[in-house]
Image (tube, rainbow, N blue to C red):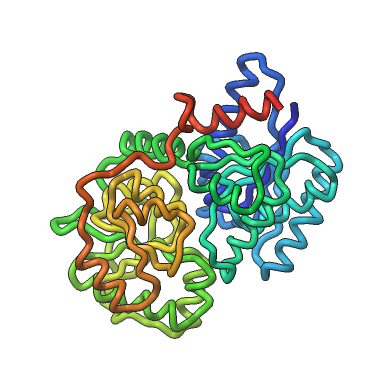
Amino acid sequence: MKIASIVGARPQFVKAAPVSRAIREAAAAGRDIAEILVHTGQHYDGNMSDIFFEELGISAPNYNLGVGSASHGVQTGAMLAAIERVLEKERPDWVLIYGDTNSTLAGALAAAKMRLPIAHVEAGLRSYDRRMPEEINRIVADQLSTALFCPSRNAAANLRKEGIRDGVSIVGDVMAEALEYAVVRSMREAEEKPGSGEYGYVLATVHRAENTDDPARLRNILKALEAIGRIRPVVFPVHPRTKKMIAAAGWKPEAKGPEKSGARRAKTTAGAGIRFIDPVGYLEMARLESGAEMILTDSGGVQKEAYWLKVPCITLRDRTEWVETVASGWNVLAGTDTKKIIRAAENFTIPEKSAPLYGRGPKSAAPASRRIVDILLKS
């Protein structure tokens, strides 16, 4: 069996790592399976791409399409054409897609038009906000997929609402495996906890278009981080696109001179309590997350990681697809209203209990990655 895995963005590298390892282990055990890894180039910066392959033990891509950044339509179209050429050459038995990026959508469309079966890891997630490009990508990918691997019962229920019942499996979340691997390795390698200090630190990440492309929303977030930073330092690894949009929004902190961020290899510029640092690799991010007193983010993956690490999370979005984290009390939706974000950070109450979420499938002790590979091999 030949599987073509389509990845292109930072979250997909994280999700693909455990599955790629499970495929290699199955092949080493004599099972008939092999992977062709296709990197679209959606994230092409070294800190956003290469370092993830190195740290997570992912084999070098068989194909790097080098698509790069562009508008949604241009980027997806370029990916679609390039992926189609690879699939025509390789003729895989399955096309494996991850998450909800433009790489996901392009992989699904290319495979569907060639009548190749599609397996979607992280199927069934819904924020029910179609203003989010990711929501459109999820819906289309799920409609086109033959095998749908859900991280939770709620995700499977979402698919049933849309009439999708065949090929649905609740396997758990592969990101739980990736985070466990990263935390163990990063703590073993760390000489000291990053960003640690007498009063701790808050970790912030902002990258979604709904926030970065709206100057008012972006400025509101930065004002909130600035206010929080007057009490506790805010460590902010800045996505390259976010950095560009911050400059375009005309936001400038009150300069205080350079400081150390506490994150290895990261260059910093500090002002008004926010320490801007370059993007970091997955191991470094896992260390920053595990050492933070609180996380403010618009990332879906970081919301889950905060829950698993039991770090309070403020989500800088109006809605989330990871509704279980909000129901648990470990995640608060604050949107982008400055005062609401500050109040959420000041008044966060840590829940007394926390149920296991997004771990292994409900009927198996096997990790999600192994369940995915076993289901594909039996298909």
**Front in this rendered view, residue 330 or 24:** 330
Q: Is residue 359 left or right of residue 241?
A: left
For the N terminus, the image quarter is top right
Position of 342 with respect to 18 (left or right) is left
Q: Position of residue 341 (x, y in %)?
A: 31, 72
Q: Is residue 344 above or below residue 97?
A: below
The single residue placed furthest to the top in the displayed view is 30
Query: Where is residue 19, by image quadrant?
Result: top right
Above or below: residue 254 compared with residue 143: below
User: Which residue in the rendered view is the most extreme toward the left?
Assistant: 198
Q: Is residue 328 placed above or below 252 in the rendered structure?
A: above
Q: How many marks?
A: 0
Query: In the image, residue 305 lies at what x, y percent?
Result: 39, 48
Residue at left offset 62%, top offset 39%: 168
Residue at x 37%, y 52% (from the top left corner)? 325
Residue at 23% in and 55% down: 293
Residue 49 visible in rendering: no
Does residue 370 appear in this view?
Answer: yes
Quarter of the image with the C terminus is: top right
Q: x, y percentage for residue 119?
A: 67, 40
- Say whether residue 360 is left or right of residue 374: left
Quadrant for residue 217, please give it: bottom left
User: Would you place residue 159 above or below residue 228 in this image?
Assistant: above
Foreground: 253 or 76? Answer: 76
Residue 98, percent from left and from top? 61, 46
Q: Residue at x 43, y 66 (%)?
A: 206
